[in-house]
Image (cartoon, rainbow, N blue to C red):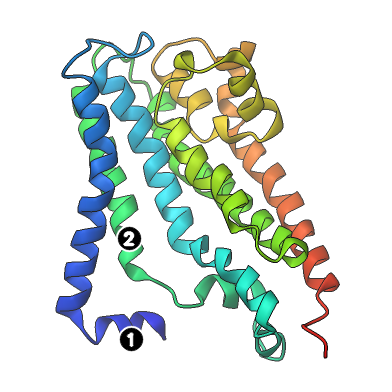
Amino acid sequence: MWIRSTMTYRFSFAVALLSNLVANFFDFVVILLMFTHVRGLGGFSFAEVAFLYGTTSTAFGLADLAFGQVSRLGRRVRDGTLDMLLVRPAPVLAQVAADRFALRRLGRPLQGLLVLVWSLVVLDGVAWTPVTVAMVPLMVVTGTLIFGSVMVAGAAFQFWAQDGAEVVNSFTYGGNTLLQYPPSIFAGELVRGVVYVVPLAFVNWVPALYVLGRESPAGLPWWAAFASPLVAVVCMGPAGLAWRAGLRSYRSTGS
């Protein structure tokens, strides 16, 4: 319904999509400007940083497109409008994710994909094998699932907090920004936190460093690069349980 509504005004949609793509491209411009003054960042070349940027931005953009609207749940909990979703013959999570679905958000994953493709063209010294080639799309898919799981878990948190969108954004938008840069420029405690506590590092750091022929972060063994699908499944389980627990605890606004 929201897509049909958007496509009714196609020129307006095209302008909004282009604006979204250009606005997100300025994130990459910041990295580009950095490399006009330095030859490397934490021991990584411009092409390698672009590779990190492209993988996480594409994955986060797809997750944001599919689940970004769940951040609005807190408002529905506060004003009681979640009630009307409960009486409809459709999963509540699907309804919340589709609420005011903004197709213009497609600009973010498109922009990330453009940077990713460009980085693959200019990368030097990478031993491309069937395994490393397959890991690139696998990173995007598993990264999307990991980011989506964090978004769903954050939405479940709002059943109790009612206004915790900014807390969730620190892990989603903040995590996306963090993963755009090499782990070598961050403190060891922070790197271990996104590896062992909130495993956002498996979105791209862990598998991407394997592709680039570098050591895994936080002392992980080399085979951890292949654990991203398992991490995604592990993240989806608790996120789903948290959502169900939050939905059961919902008591409307009362009177």
Q: Which SS class for mark 1? A: helix
Q: Amino acid at mark 2?
A: Leu
Q: Residue at x 48, y 54 (%)?
A: 63
Q: Quadrant of residue 39?
A: top left
Residue 10 in percent (x, y) is at 19, 79
Q: Residue at x 24, y 45 (%)?
A: 25
Q: Amino acid at mark 1?
A: Ser
Q: CA distance from mark 1 to mark 2?
A: 16 Å
Residue 149 in percent (x, y) is at 62, 51
- Front-lying residue, 141 or 252: 252
Res 128 seen here: yes
In the displayed structure, does residue 107 sit left or right of residue 217?
left
Residue 161 in percent (x, y) is at 74, 61
Q: Residue at x 26, y 36 (%)?
A: 28
Q: Which residue in the rendered view is the most extreme toward the front?
A: 255
The quarter in which the C terminus is drawn is bottom right
Q: Looking at the image, is 188 positioned above or below residue 198?
A: above
The quarter in which the N terminus is drawn is bottom left
Q: Residue at x 40, y 82 (%)?
A: 2
In the displayed structure, does residue 155 sit left or right of residue 44?
right
Q: Which mark is residue 106?
A: 2
In the displayed structure, does residue 246 sit left or right of residue 182?
right
